[in-house]
Image: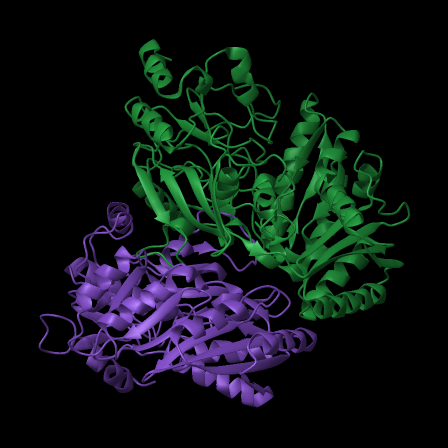
Amino acid sequence: MSKQELAQRLGPLRARLPGRAEPLPLASPESEPELAQIISTAHDAGLKVLAVGAGSRLGGSYGCRADLLVSTRKLSGVVAYEPGDGTITALAGTLMSELAACARAGGHRLTPDIPRPETATLGGVLADGLSGGDRLRFGPTRHHVLGMRVLLADGTITKTGGRLVKNVTGFEMHRLYAGSAGSLCIILEATMRLFPAPAERAFGKIDCGSLEEALHLSAALSAPPLEPTAITLSKLNQEWSLSVTLDGRSERVNRERSIAEERAPRAEWSLGAEADAAYVNTRDSSPEEGDTASLRVSVRPSRLHTILKLVLAHAPTARLLAHPAVGTLELSLDAGSELSTLVTELREASATVRVRGASDDAAPRKTAALEARLQQALDPEDVFCGRP
Amino acid sequence: MKQSLLRALKAVVGADGLTIDPTRRKAYECDGLAMVRRVPDLVLAPIDTREAAECLRILSNEGLPIIPRGAGTGLSGGATPHKGGVVFKTTRMRRVLEVNELDRFARVEAGVVNADLSNACSHHALSYAPDPSSQQACTIGGNVANNSGGPHCFRYGATTRSIMGLVVVTADGEVHELGGPEPDAEGYDLVGCFVGSEGMLGVATEVTCKLIPAPETSETLLALFPSLDGACDAVTELIAANLEPSAIEILDRLTIEAVEASVLAAGYSDKAEAVLLIDVDGLNEEVRATVRDIEAIARSRGAFEVRTATDAKERRRLWAGRKGAFGAMGRIAPDLYVADVVVPRTRLKEIVLRSTELCRERGLKVSNVFHAGDGNLHPNISYDRRDADEVARVLDAGTEIMKACIAAGGSLSGEHGIGIEKRDEMHRVFNEDDLDAMLKMRAAWDPSGQMNPGKAIPVRGCMEVKTKPVAVAANGGSQ
């Protein structure tokens, strides 16, 4: 991606940064020393830096008052892929699609399997704390980050963790950095745990007459002994659709599919390449960060029905995609939606909410003081203005 | 210890929560790292979060070192008392607060014993995955502090992957609710940051744990090898073949002999030089296929016998032998130094061989029982702490094994933590900037530096003036 292309991609996002009639300066360093120099300069000059990857999302940072955008997109490449160890280490600017392809070629699967991986970098995904639908089986992304190298606000480069699948040496700073949205550091490199690539995949789709039917089927399809890779609920117009992805070695997929057919007799199944395509199509239907506000909501699975009812009451035409067996929901709101009321009610219903593309004017969360101390400890000059 | 302070603390925890008597305090002079001992000035045992917070608020005014402790089964000296310090034990906080079958989580107090949690949820056909060998005694709070592992973390991950939320009390007595049953918290991942922090950020008093459903089938496979090399090669090959068992363990000859001579005799073999013990979980068809593939690999690597446990009773016996292996070593010598190092899985065989050589060169008796699937080695050196020269050789061997692992791309600890045992070796893995970042993070949680000072991070320069080092004595005496 050229600097112009990157600037073009960043364009609409930059327009959302408040108090900036003109586009922000964009730095796209080609080496770590160059990046460190930029950050040191910003640090000394009192400039606020917003770190981005490929610019496909800005997370909670829309409201920040940045003086400079810094992209890590050009710090790209796989540093080490160790098939025998099941780990992959890559620079932050590496596209998720490139990383996944490298792992797949060696017989591995990269998790998270995020929507539109060709538009997002490893560093950006980790900074945003983004997980994929495959977290139903593999858990959230943060569980699979084994180590990082990061650039701190004073220009020093530090490492945390390592390249080992099991390691408790030192504090797990990488867990703190993952999901910190560039507010503590800029991620330079990360090592991820890999899983065996599936030998087979089956994809089942069920058109549901109601939300209740969809949630009932989701519970049935995630009950033991089934262990699906993903269950996805989407709403198009007034139609609810549920999909289930089963993959692994053939003996497992065949057995799981026979159980799933009993539990969801109306499911339409695709296999092989057709299943791969259907899975990717569903994965990529997740709402993009765009011109309107979007929300990432997380709740205990048993409370998702309540949460979805709230969403439908306040934003009946919102685009939404949920992973009901996990308890996560992404939705893109129409302009003019009652954002603050909806967010307040969702939180009152025990959901956690991350607001994208708009300010989150909620009262400070209970951990705000501790988080502020962490931010102050690692970036005392407040150079990094990203916010989770 | 000031009488006024003792009175104030007693008013919070009562007589049962306060240990002043020197003889009873002596029971807390060390954890599983028995070669370093110091009797604490006081032992406090609050019964819940409220008492813990009140005690810490009182202690914060005194600036005394606070040493969080679960069952004291840690092996790296993470709970070794600090001079003038207060041991803050969580073992009276032992209620299972909630088992939520629908959303598959449990809320427990920090002093709940690991095995008791799995027992508490077994009638829901759920279990808590992390299973350290000490699970019959170790506490969930201790597991959180050390990010403990166990045989089945090959598939299910170390403790951090099973922790959803925490209630933490920091040194100033403030109570923090971090995470919870929701899949994602808002803001920073403070739960992930806290797990594995070895009691240096605060005391966890309540833990929300993820539970997993029982698999349709579990098979335990036993492969007997004429050489340790063959067993290691089989592990490398089955990982390369992308097979997904839930646990992959190796026991060497000396370990097998110790186990078979103990009350935990598992019926491994009297002919094998190495035993490969593997669990496979999943659907019936999947498990059968995976066992078949593993069996073929084991035989191709020289296994002279491969079999699966015939029933649940035999499974339990095979695993009891593995988990009791450290205790069984007591037959070899009065004391056991359990090294804990980790290497890339592809370097397993080489490092097992090297660590055995390093011990033999020093005239030490070493046995190996380890989490082969994760590259997590436990060279176990038997010794007698009354022999100062032998203790020195044990420590030297431990250091050399660490160096060999790091040179092979490994690290200091796979699951036991750093504590005081490996604190001064941290510079072999991290530079000054790395360690400074960790200290800055720690200072955000505990600006006073009272929580478990002198552990995990080497003392360097003026940043840690409040965290004086604990000298490691080779003679094993009190310091």
Q: Where does residue B136 sit, x and y in percent of width and height?
A: 63, 37
Q: Residue B237 versus residue B438: which sits nearer the camera?
A: B237
Asked whether the viewer can see residue B99, the reply is yes
Corner quadrant of residue A154: bottom left
Residue at 56 percent of width and 65 percent of height: A223
Q: Position of residue B166 (x, y in %)?
A: 40, 45
Tell me what hue chain B is rendered in.
Answer: green
Which quadrant of the view contains residue A241? Answer: bottom left
Q: In the picture shown, does residue A37 fall above or below B320?
A: below
Image x and y of residue B362, in percent: 74, 36
Q: Residue furthest bottom?
A: A274
Q: Residue at x 32, y 16 (%)?
A: B8
Looking at the figure, which quarter contains the C terminus of chain A?
A: bottom left
- Is A215 in front, or is B192? A215
The residue closer to the viewer here, A369 or A283, is A283
Instruction: Give residue A2's quadrant in the image.
Output: bottom left
Towards the viewer: A67 or A86: A86
Whether residue A153 is visible to the viewer of this picture, yes or no, is: no
- Chain A tint as drawn: purple
Picture residue at 49% right of the left edge, 43% below the top: B144
Q: Is residue A100 above or below residue B452?
A: below
